[in-house]
């Protein structure tokens, strides 16, 4: 029984008990549930487990465990635990329940072996996570949550239509049931993972080869925040509660990256989509004032690196995507935790109102800097040992333009996430805010994440050993991934050059002044238009205009018709009224004459 | 009150001279890192027949690339702000 329980189910079902508990027992449950779920995965569901069930003529695989899904399974559990610890002081059961269900659904989704199961979890992550945004309980967060929910559920609907189109081509899906010998339609995500190693034969994964798979691709793309489909991320995440954003940052988008890695490895267009994703959000990040929104943009930028890795589709690049997702969840959560702590203590997260907080929140500042160094891929921090796999893979496949874009984005992410976030929150000009250090549970959660960021950076071995491909091709030679060292003289020095000269640019632009103002754009109380503008301004305005015009046209039509009707009524009145020829009383003689005339006419017609 | 002011003033970074020290240290490290290019053999990804095109091998390529990228990024973002910046309550209007 216990080894046929889907991963994540402990969290989803356990979440229902949480509102019944209070105080310490509730807190214990919040930490115990992710721990139990992780133990269940590690002890009872070994790699290779695949549990199917037959529903009508379909074969579903609610549990499918291989090396690719395990990477996400492990990191999702770590993220669930650390985020729960970070949110331990929160007295709002709604947030706890939705966070646990959300984490459980994301974990369930990465172990889904078929598209129907994936769809169910896909929608559950959308519906459960929106409460983390609504929990801010403001008009603004309510509206942002609504927009988020519509887009997320929309992604699910597109996924479902993709699945239905995919089903209409059943020949490729038909297979024989292993247990009963009956013919069954399998919606397997792909063949077992080891079969598509190398991923050369068509049909071994979804790929972009029919309308159905294109729709599935778009559904994944919405959740992965592809360029122009990205706005829900930077719109909604910064509106969630300080603790809610930490959960949100971990699961939804990385689930989408997993789904892409599972269904679309080696799909070339992903390389260019990913490269665009790494570059364009950083322009926004530089001028954004809400520091959690800056992080949302850099989250989007980091997803770009992973999408490039999926697009390249070699063993090295898929490893790069998997390991980068692992490291990214930790340092991004760490950065959101530090900004969440600032928001929790000061009540604001606007760069224009913050500064000098290192004096009152030194620990938070320190943890933030560790997160910043990790996302910037400083040597000895986690991003360094994971992102370089993707860059090396891009160079090996001779994608020189993409490689240069990734290099630009690496410098840019250091510039806005590595420097801007800690600088404007904790240093810059002193805002005069004197607050208490973050609560103990927040500090411990940040410490754990920071320790893991450094540990991965110094000792990448354990992370490399769980990656999907243990054999990788580097410079035409097949080697063990564990033997691949990123700490070469060239790599360390070139990376340090890139980063420190970026820091130099920041310093120079901040200190050199034109007309008394620094060249670096100051933090201003403002917002910047993004693609959500389309459906927040012109679209509602157009709908309102159409409605107003419609009302006017209807009024005009009614007016004309009423005038016509009145005219006709007055004619009828004239004809049929008391004085009209039809309405008046006629004499008997007159009637007899008319009858005679009609008879004559009848006779005449008869003889014709 | 005086005591509070004193405790407020004890931070090392409050003194602009110390901030300058950090900035000068950064300049020095940047110079050292670029200088390091002279003393080791760079292992590069992209090689061309004409070795002059091996851009990764150019002296201080990664440093200058990072610097130019960030200056370009900031200048472009400044221009973007002219087009995209709105009041904070823009969407509430």
Image (cartoon, grey):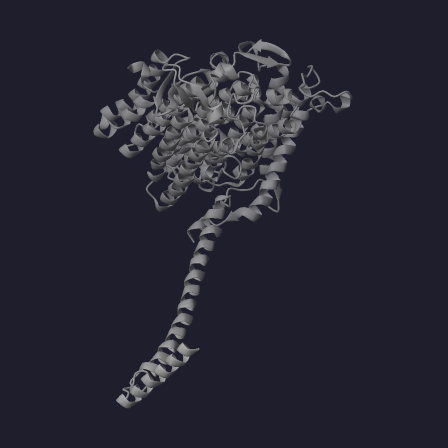
Q: Can you give x and y, in whole percent of width and height, for residue A265 in the image?
A: 54, 23
Residue B10 visible in image: no
Q: Can you give x and y, in whole percent of width and height, for residue A34 in the image?
A: 33, 21
Front-most of residues A23 and A222: A222
Q: Can you give x and y, in whole percent of width and height, for residue A390 in the image?
A: 57, 22
Q: Looking at the figure, which quarter contains the C terminus of chain B?
A: bottom left
Front-most of residues A239 and A548: A548
Q: Which residue is rendered at x = 62% and y = 36% of the image? A: B71
- Specify whether A400 is left or right of A12: right
Quarter of the image where one finds residue A84 = top left
Position above or below: A233 against A193: below
Front-most of residues A123 and A167: A167
Q: Seen from this angle, which residue lies furthest right?
A: B50
Q: Can you give x and y, in whole percent of width and height, for residue A391 in the image?
A: 59, 23
Q: Which residue is rendered at x = 75% and y = 24% of the image? A: B53
Q: Looking at the figure, which quarter contains the N terminus of chain B?
A: top left
Front-most of residues A369 and A256: A256
Position above or below: A520 against B59: below
């Amino acid at each position: 029984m216990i080894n046929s329980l889907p991963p994540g189910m402990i969290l989803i079902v356990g979440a229902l008990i949480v509102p019944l508990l209070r105080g310490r027992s509730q807190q214990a449950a919040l930490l115990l549930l992710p721990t139990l779920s992780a133990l269940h995965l590690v002890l009872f569901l070994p790699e290779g487990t695949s549990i199917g069930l037959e529903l009508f003529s379909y074969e579903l695989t609610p549990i499918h465990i291989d090396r690719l899904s395990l990477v996400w399974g492990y990191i999702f559990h770590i993220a669930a635990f650390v985020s729960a610890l970070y949110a331990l002081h929160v007295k709002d059961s709604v947030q706890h329940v939705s966070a646990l269900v959300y984490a459980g659904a994301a974990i369930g989704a990465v172990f889904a072996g078929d598209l129907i199961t994936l769809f169910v979890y896909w929608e559950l992550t959308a519906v459960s996570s929106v409460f983390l945004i609504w929990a801010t309980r403001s008009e603004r967060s309510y509206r942002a949550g609504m927009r988020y929910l519509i887009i997320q559920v929309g992604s699910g609907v597109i996924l479902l239509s993709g699945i239905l189109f995919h089903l209409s081509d059943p020949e490729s899906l038909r297979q024989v049931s292993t247990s009963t010998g009956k013919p069954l339609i399998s919606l397997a995500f792909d063949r077992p993972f080891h079969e598509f190693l190398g991923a050369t034969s068509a049909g071994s994964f979804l790929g972009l080869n029919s309308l159905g798979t294109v729709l599935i691709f778009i559904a994944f793309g919405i959740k992965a925040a592809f360029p122009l489909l990205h706005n829900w991320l930077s719109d909604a995440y910064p509106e969630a509660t300080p603790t809610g954003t930490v959960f949100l940052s971990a699961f939804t988008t990385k689930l989408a990256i997993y789904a892409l890695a599972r269904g679309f490895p080696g799909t070339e267009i992903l390389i260019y989509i990913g490269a665009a994703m790494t570059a364009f959000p950083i322009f926004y990040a530089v001028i954004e004032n809400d520091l959690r929104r800056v992080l949302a943009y850099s989250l989007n930028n980091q997803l770009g690196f992973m999408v490039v890795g999926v697009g390249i589709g070699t063993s090295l690049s898929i490893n790069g995507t998997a390991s980068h997702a692992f490291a990214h969840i930790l340092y991004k959560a760490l950065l959101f935790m530090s900004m969440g702590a600032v928001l929790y203590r000061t009540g604001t997260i606007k760069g224009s109102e913050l500064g000098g907080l290192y004096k009152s929140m030194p620990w938070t500042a320190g943890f933030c800097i560790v997160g910043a160094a990790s996302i910037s891929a400083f040597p000895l921090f986690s991003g360094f040992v994971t992102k370089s796999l993707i860059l090396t893979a891009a160079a090996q496949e001779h994608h020189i333009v993409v490689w240069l874009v990734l290099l630009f984005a690496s410098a840019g992410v250091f510039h806005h996430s590595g420097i801007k976030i800690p600088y404007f929150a904790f240093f810059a000009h002193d805002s005069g805010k004197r607050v208490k250090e973050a609560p103990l549970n927040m500090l411990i959660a940040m410490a754990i994440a920071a320790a893991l960021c450094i540990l991965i950076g110094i000792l990448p071995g354990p992370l490399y050993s769980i990656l999907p491909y243990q054999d990788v091709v580097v410079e035409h030679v097949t080697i063990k991934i564990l033997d691949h060292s990123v700490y070469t003289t060239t790599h360390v020095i070139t990376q340090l050059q890139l980063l420190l000269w970026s820091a130099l640019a920041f310093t120079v632009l901040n200190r050199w002044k034109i007309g008394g103002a620094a060249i670096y754009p100051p933090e201003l109380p403002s917002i910047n238009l993004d693609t959500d503008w389309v459906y927040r301004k012109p679209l509602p305005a157009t709908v309102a205009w159409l409605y107003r015009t419609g009302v006017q046209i209807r009024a005009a039509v009614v007016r004309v018709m009423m005038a016509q009707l009145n005219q006709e009524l007055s004619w009828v009145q004239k004809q049929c009224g008391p004085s009209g020829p039809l309405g008046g009383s006629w004499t008997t003689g007159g009637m007899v004459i008319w009858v005679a005339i009609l008879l004559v006419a009848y006779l005449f017609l008869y003889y014709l | 009150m005086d005591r509070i002011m004193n405790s407020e003033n004890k931070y090392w970074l409050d003194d602009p001279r110390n901030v300058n020290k950090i900035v000068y240290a950064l300049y020095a490290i940047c110079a050292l890192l670029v200088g390091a290019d002279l003393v080791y053999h760079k292992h590069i990804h992209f090689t061309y027949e004409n070795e002059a095109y091996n851009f990764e091998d150019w002296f201080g390529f990664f440093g200058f690339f990072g610097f130019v990228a960030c200056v370009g990024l900031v200048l472009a973002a400044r221009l973007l702000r002219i087009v995209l910046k709105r009041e904070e309550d823009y969407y509430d209007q």
